[in-house]
Amino acid sequence: MVAGSACGKVILLGEHAVVYGHPALCGALRDGVQIEAVPGSGILSVPAWGLRVSAVKASDGSDLARAYGAVLASLGIPPSALHHDLVVRFSIPTGAGLGSSAALSVALARALGAILQIPLTPDQVARAAQAAEEVFHGRCSGLDHTVAQQGGFGLFRRPDGLVPLKAPPLPLCIGLTGRPRDTRGRVARVAELYRDRPVETRTLFRRIEELVEAAARAVTSGDLRALGTAMDENQVLLGQLEVSCPEIDQMCQLARSAGAWGAKLTGGGGGGCVIALSPGAEAAVHTAWRRAGFTSFDATIGGVEALAA
Ligand code: MEV
């Protein structure tokens, strides 16, 4: 039985600045994660990670165990109440900046509500997911778990949340650098830059905000050339924030040479994924990446109906 599910996410523009209250343009990947419930004693297993953790020992051990403990504590569920095991199945690459941990956190809260027949409010799910996300990533804006929970497409800004935008489906090429994204480390590095060079860093954030606003206008008016230009400039600024890496830079360059209108990292950076906007040149972008040894796939954001919270 599928007891809980949640979406993955793509940040089109605005990651990192969003942690400081600036907006980000983002959309859901409909199939993020599903959690199956089978009779058992509260074991949470993630076959893709080779991990099995017990609800009883959830407060110590791996990040997964502590995140599980944080969700249980947030929902006020004692381990003794659990008479099911939960099995996590991802439909998106994990550790890649596509919101897999947030999807897991939201789906876990939903699954626990379902198996215990507790009617959870959207706020309860959000708070439980936020507690788990803080275990996985430390300081975070809340964007990932909000999109995992609500689906859709729009502008996210702290503390307002996600304001939906009507956008036509937007096809993207997504390429994996092969290096895990380093959200925690990159968020910490940006915090250092903010502390040591506040004026320059705030200037970068303000320019990112202008790009996010331009990109939102471009998406809603169907001007994908302008969206690609904004993505490219956002990538330059992310490089200045020290959240890119050589593989990301190489993949962006390969995508542009193959005909992409814009390319950038998505999510925490330091590894993870590159997104390329390549109308009509998708095959060429995938070929260029694959020849260089990278794996990739197609995905669509926007045009995704919001899920029940
Ligand atoms: C991670 O997917 C996005 C970041 O902006 C962190 C956050 O928003 O919490 C890097």
Image (cartoon, rainbow, N blue to C red):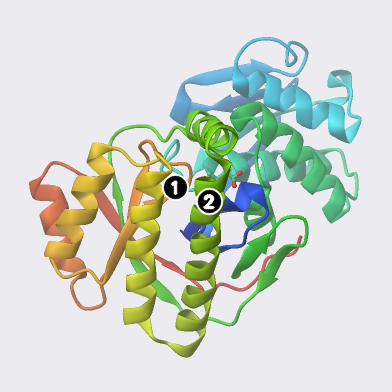
Q: Nearer the viewer, residue 124 or 202?
A: 202
Residue 136 picture quarter: top right
Residue contact between numbered discs 1 and 2, judged by CB atoms under 8 Å:
yes
Label located before the other in sequence (1 or 2) = 2
On screen, residue 207 above or below 294: below
Q: Respond yes or no on whether mark 2 lies under 8 Å from ligand 1.
A: no
* CA distance separating discs 1 and 2: 6 Å
**Does any portion of residue 27 appear in the rendered image?**
no
Q: Residue 71 sits in which quadrant?
A: top right
Q: Residue at x 57, y 34 (%)?
A: 191
Residue 8 % position (x, y): 53, 52
Determine if the C-beta at disc 1 is less than 8 A from ligand 1: no
Q: Give the residue displayed 64% in from the left and 10% down from the top.
A: 61
In terms of image quarters, where does ligand 1 lie? top right
Can you say which quadrant of the picture contains the C terminus?
Answer: bottom right
Q: Which mark is residue 277?
A: none
Question: Is residue 123 shown to the viewer in this render?
Answer: yes
Q: Residue at x 85, y 32 (%)?
A: 74
Amino acid, disc 1: Ile
Callout 1: SS: loop
Q: Is residue 181 above or below residue 18?
A: above
Location of mark 2 (residue)? 32
Q: Amino acid at mark 2?
A: Gly
In screen coordinates, is 199 left or right of 125?
left
Q: Position of residue 276 (x, y in %)?
A: 30, 62
At 23% from the left and 38% from the top, the residue drawn is: 246
Q: On residue 92, which mark appears? A: 1
Seen from the viewer's position, the closer of residues 34 and 150 is 150
Across and down, in percent, residue 175 comes to: 28, 51
Residue 45 versus residue 258: which sits nearer the camera?
Answer: 258
Label 2 secondary element: strand
